[in-house]
Image (cartoon, grey):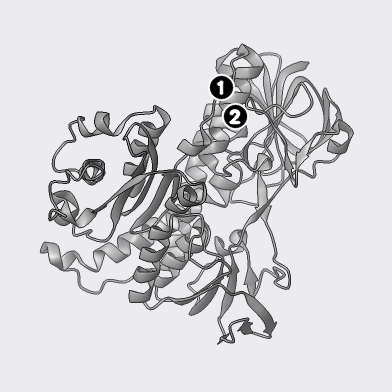
Amino acid sequence: MIYDIAIIGAGPGGYVAAIRAAQLGAKVVLVERDNLGGTCLNWGCIPSKAVLTCADKYNSAKKFSKFGIDIEGLSFDYKKVSERKWLVVEKLRKSLTQVIKANKIDVIYGEASIETANKLKVACSCHSEVLTHVVQYLPDESGTYQEAKASEESVEFKNLIIATGSRPVSLPGLQIDHEFILDTNDIIQLEKVPESVLVVGTGPSGIEWTRIFEIFGSKVTLVELAPNLVPICDKSISERLERIFKIKKIQCHTGTKIKEISGKKVLLENGQEIEPEIVFVAAGRFPNTEIKGIESLNLAKNGRYLKVDNNLKTSADNIYAIGDVTGLVPLAHTASHQGMTAVENILLNKQGNINYEAIPHIVYGNPELCAVGLREEDLIRKKIDYKSSNFPVGATSKFFIEDELEGFVKVLSSPDGNKILGVHIVADHGSDLIQQAAIAINNNLTVKQLQETIFAHPTYSEALYEAFLGLDNMSLHVMPK
């Protein structure tokens, strides 16, 4: 059989691409060396958010007395938190497996190597590192899926999509040993809460696990090489988070790094010495572009990443790449959209038009840190004229009712209001608001159009509306300037 599309990697990019291809009538095969869902479902986004949700609910319960609800003997059991995390992963993965089967997508579990521009070899495996035994599924002549034995399979295809994702990396002088110095895969497998933890790096993973550990009682210290926490965010978000962490007694060391480690003593370049129970390295990932045989394709690269055009096509006509291997806004939802774009280009010749500036970024926890579009410092550096509005979420009735007063909505627009340049949010339910902002940016809505839209009352969204009004000094629920 010659497949219309073969896909290496069944993460949020690969499996979405496969489903879209099947919807369009293509014969498609997914090759995955571990489990359907990739890092996001099995090791990253989903299990970490499952733990964070438990932490947030426990934290919320601490203030239930404000709402007339008294809870005696409030406590948590991290073992049960961990068990629920894996249960969530397992249920979602089983659901995804059923969707894949229903779309008659062939799945081969094993390590792929590239033989030619139209042929893969897969060393099949029934091995799984997470929870349940994973099998290789291939349809028999009747179309029924049967368990396949470990073997080596040849896969011929017309088009190939590389969706192999990324992996945690060690930093110079900070080698992951999986005992004292842990990576993101290690941290998700912890069965107990450490008494103290040093978190290296303040990207989404670092911040989210900092919040988890703090809520569950760990002493947390953060180290960030950049001058501010979460350097990918607007400086206003970084400054607000630093203030929040200071109140929570989380020690933050910015503009420095680890100088040396002796036993369990960690010396920072700023002279501070720390002795944590564990060190969690949350400082980046490395793209999985080292597929065996890929060098024979002579694909163009941007540094360590595969170079692609607007359609996600590489320098080879029938080879596409999506997700973290492209280095283009490496987020799960980016990979999914790229997967659909690549497939529609292959099968429909539809031209890709992804607006990477309209992709929302979210750091979860309470309050959530959210952004879409350009940061204020980006506008200053690029010498782009703008106006701004900053509205405190606590001034809206819904946030006040929920007793979630911390945060703001900041909107940046062109001086004439014809273009929303960026939206930055610190707020409970900020992830719901940022998607509305992304829709506005992606569809080139003007400030006036948004100001003339009626927002329901009382809702969280009113904070976004008030920020849009504030661009013309029209905010209703703050004191006039």
Q: Identify which amino acid the numbered label 1 is placed on.
A: Arg
Q: Is residue 9 above or below residue 408?
A: above
Q: Position of residue 263 (x, y in %)?
A: 68, 86
**233 left or right of 175?**
left
Check whether the beta carbons of the residues at disc 2 and disc 1 lie within 8 A of each other.
Answer: yes
Q: Bin the neighbour count of mark 1 within 10 Å (Cα to Cα): few under 14, some 14-19, many 20 and up.
A: some
The residue under the point 72% across, 36% down is: 307
The residue under the point 77% across, 35% down is: 149
Q: Is residue 447 above or below residue 467?
A: above
**119 left or right of 427?**
right
Q: Bin the neighbour count of mark 2 within 10 Å (Cα to Cα): few under 14, some 14-19, many 20 and up.
A: many
The residue under the point 66% across, 13% down is: 142
Q: Locate the C terminus by quadrant.
A: bottom left
Res 143 seen here: no
The residue under the point 58% across, 63% down is: 282
Q: Position of residue 88 (x, y in %)?
A: 46, 48
Q: Which mark is residue 339?
A: 2
For residue 153, what is the image quadrant?
top right
**180 left or right of 204?**
right
- Report the residue marked by disc 1: 20
Q: Which mark is residue 295?
A: none
- Give the Cα distance between marks 2 and 1: 8 Å
